[in-house]
Amino acid sequence: MHITDHTATELAEKIKLGEIGVTEAVKASLERIGASERAVGAFLTVEPEKALERAREVEDGIRSGRYAGPLAGVPVAVKDNICTNGTRTTCASRILENFVPFYDATAVKLLEDAGMVILGKTNMDEFAMGSTTETSAFAVTKNPWNTGHVPGGSSGGSCAAVAAGECFAALGSDTGGSIRQPSSYCGVAGIKPTYGTVSRYGLIAYASSLDQIGPIGRSVSDCAALLSVIAAHDEKDSTSVKRGDTDFMSALGDSPRGLRIGIPNEYLSDGLDPDVRDAVGRAAEWLKDAGATVDCFDLGLMEYTIPTYYVIASAEASSNLERFDGVKYGYRAAEYEGLHDMYKRSRSEGFGEEVKRRIMLGSFVLSSGYYDAYYLKALRVKALIKRAFDDAFSRFDIILGPAAPTAAPKLGTSLSDPMKMYLSDIYTVAVNLAGLPGLSVPCTVNGLGLPVGVQLIGDCFAEKKLFTAGAAIEAARAADGETRFTRPVSVCGGAEEAAHTGKECAR
Ligand code: GLN
């Protein structure tokens, strides 16, 4: 077994036992990055020297007992909208192309405190606006399972890096599905935690009332372990929550017996790809076999979630992105006449098309005369959506459904029709509007050899139930012989053939 085939928690265990060295693990990741980056393109920045130096430091720290946690020594990647002290943080935007933060995001600091080794920064949709990672100003990331397809977005770089074995885990951010949807497309596990669980300090804001940082891993237990590391109250984020139940690994061994699972009828309506429908059905059967009850119910308000999300997210984005004016930091146009022209040109040249579209939409819904009709109304509908979930969680422990309506689309087919792209967020955005946790778990591989995940949604602060059910799905999948989730095609060759036959290729 190659080092990079281990999950993060397995690797940490072996490091603790002295069977694998931290430097050895970092070298293995860097080699894998060297071998597959040309095909996958998950990273915007890789810092080999820094990582190797840090590996030696962590090795000493483990020996001295300073780093004793369950992920000490594990190489990890960080989405490029999360600030890293001394390392370029671009948000995949020209406007921040040369931005080097002088402080760490709290989540990054917590990774370091846990003895993890940061390898680099991953590609994403510009300012996390998009669903394919194709709105990045710098690079196109490919799906490691079939490099003709997108990895999803906006945390596509993080998910592709984990799927390709280039790192053992990664941080992503989720405003309307950006962890859960690319996790489903890339065959990895990813969780958007309850709002307030992970500090947003140092996360470059898209829509502050919806943004959450979360972990992405090759297994549900890796996600649980990484969430335990980054979930902490932080005075630097006024929306950070004090919660005492952050030992998420403790839920992994619990039995799903008695868990009440609900599937919204609306989630299975027309337009859902048959492969995704099958995946949800399969997950439901697995959970039933493990002792859970599964029932369908009407959640309601589904048709309002996309418009509500795009009004609120764009409104907040237009306000948050006002700070990029070419004055304090970031890109400034080379030529301009006067202050206003400088603002105009810097922003016109610095932002990409999708970001500009959101700024215009957001400015419109916040403008006087339209504020009540759009923004205020959206806030009211948001409250109703939360109530619909409250009602559902009075009857169910977990809501089961798709993470996305299809498997990963082909590269180059999404950006020409933004409305269609927005509509593909149908299963994820409501979770952010209601502040709930949502876990994406790999479930099956379709006929094209592309992974399909399912989503488990919980009530606020009920992540543990999600991990229990997610681990049960994972165990049932393994028992069914579905072991392909650690073997995406692009990193073991034969992408073409595997894409046609959907068959696993030998490494
Ligand atoms: N696709 C959604 C959007 O573009 C969600 C993005 C995200 O979660 N960051 O807004």
Image: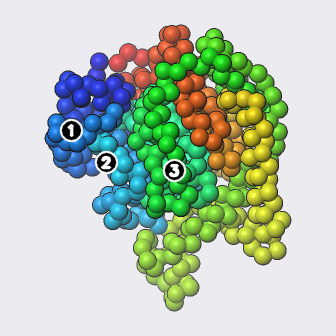
Q: Position of residue 244 (x, y in %)?
A: 49, 43
Point out the frontmost of discs 1 and 2: 1
Whether residue 145 is visible to the viewer of this picture, yes or no, is no
* Residue ID for mark 3: 242
Q: Quadrant where the N terminus lies?
A: top left
> Residue at left 68%, top 29%?
397
Q: Quadrant where the C terminus lies?
A: top left
Q: Position of residue 481 (x, y in %)?
A: 50, 10
Whether residue 4 is visible to the viewer of this picture, yes or no, is yes
Residue type at the position of mark 2: Glu
Residue 470 appears left or right of 247? right
Measure the alpha-carbon separation of dots 1 and 2.
15 Å
446 and 174: which one is in front? Answer: 174
Q: Position of residue 457 (x, y in %)?
A: 64, 35
* Residue ID for mark 2: 112
Q: Secondary structure at mark 3?
A: loop
Q: Secondary structure at mark 2?
A: helix
Q: Quadrant of residue 330?
A: bottom left
Residue type at the position of mark 1: Gly
Q: Which mark is residue 65?
A: 1
